[in-house]
Amino acid sequence: MRQEAWQDLMPGNWQNVFPGCDDQGCGGIRRMWRRLWSRHSWIKLQGACYCADECFEKAVIPCFDRARTPAVSTKPIQHRIPLGLLLLSRGLLTNSQLRTALEAQRTRGHGRIGEWLESLGFATEQQITVALGVQWRCPVLQPSAVADPHCARMLPLRLLQNFRMLPIQFVASTRVFYLAFSDGLDYTALYAIEQMLHCRTEACLMSRSRLVQSLERIAHQPRQGDLHFEGWRAPKEMARITCDYVLKLGAEEVRIVGCGEYIWARLESGSDFSNLLFRCPVPELDKPGASPKLSIASPGIPA
């Protein structure tokens, strides 16, 4: 070891070289030897620093446990003006047309009222989209607006498909992320994105057909860095899997957030990043013997 390196380890100096690990059970000497012999750098988790994979794995368990509890209510908002009444008040619909659409919806037992109005020819898709914008009090994306294709790579494809949302633009200077929905805003997804990317989200609405076409194009584009797991049961198992990928990918920072039925872990190393998505519908949470299983691995990422 060079003389300068030994001088750095002299009393009073070594603490600058080996800053404190946020694991309360990690001692200074133990931390120093770990740092000397470890092949990996310090790992940041939700803003805290950990000196080794053991410390990190222990700290990530409660993060997964907290992520299982939704931070934002996913119950639909009931106090908004019904879409049919909005169209009726604007003179775009008659009473008989609305009753016919409601009866078809009730008889078939599925579908949104807007879908039935459009399929019966009582309203156009654009009229329904504009009415949804009034209902949700948010702007409607102009048909001529073009989404930045690079924004789609910032978020996992599975989340885009699950929440039916499309990244439109990310302004790095102000850290504002613009996203579009087709069936109403999902605040669970918006909150998760803000927590994960340290940004502010702005939402708008766009027609369903255009959003579906955009998501299909994104799905056919080459993507790397998204890994999906099904059937997890315990936070300890998810922590172990995440720690394994941190070591494989050389990740320097990890953030974890709950997002609907998904738990999203983002692993960053410089400008590169990977997304781990753990999906578990509520009925599977208490299944005995359930274990995480890799369902889809992106090219170029070690499974």
Image: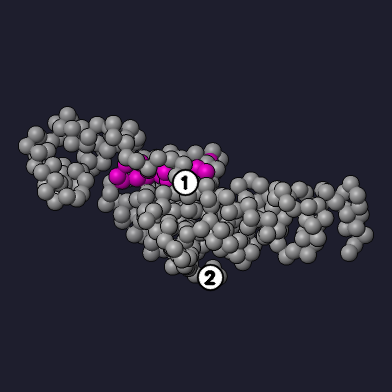
Task: Look at the image and tell me whether residue 242 can be seen.
Answer: no
275 or 259, nearer to the observer: 259
234 inside magenta stretch:
no
Q: Position of residue 288 (x, y in %)?
A: 44, 63
**Residue found at x 10% / y 43%:** 103
Q: Is residue 17 above or below residue 232?
A: above
- The x and y percentages for residue 207 are 28, 46
* In this picture, residue 204 sits left or right of residue 71: left
Depth order, front residue of 77/208: 77
Q: Which mark is residue 260?
A: none
**Residue 69, labelled with which disc?**
1
**For the point 15% across and 35% down, which residue is it?**
92
User: Quick one: SS at disc 1?
Assistant: loop
Q: Which of 70 and 84 lies nearest the eye of the viewer?
A: 70
* Residue at 12% in and 38% down: 98
Q: Nearer the viewer, residue 95 or 208?
A: 95
**As shown in the figure, which amino acid type bears the numbered disc 1?**
Thr
Residue 109 position within the rendered picture, expressed as x and y whole percent measured from the top left: 17, 50
Percent across and percent down for residue 69 are: 47, 46
Vertical order, 66 against 213 (above or below): above
For the residues marked 2 and 1, what is the alpha-carbon distance in whole angstroms? 28 Å
Please identify the quadrant where the N terminus is shown: bottom right
Quarter of the view holding residue 296: bottom left
Q: Which residues are magenta?
A: 175-195
Marks 1 and 2: in contact by CB < 8 Å? no
The question of residue 186 being in magenta is answered with yes
Instruction: Give the label on residue 303, or none.
Output: 2
Q: Amino acid at mark 2?
A: Ala
Horizontal side, residue 201 vs residue 136: left or right = right
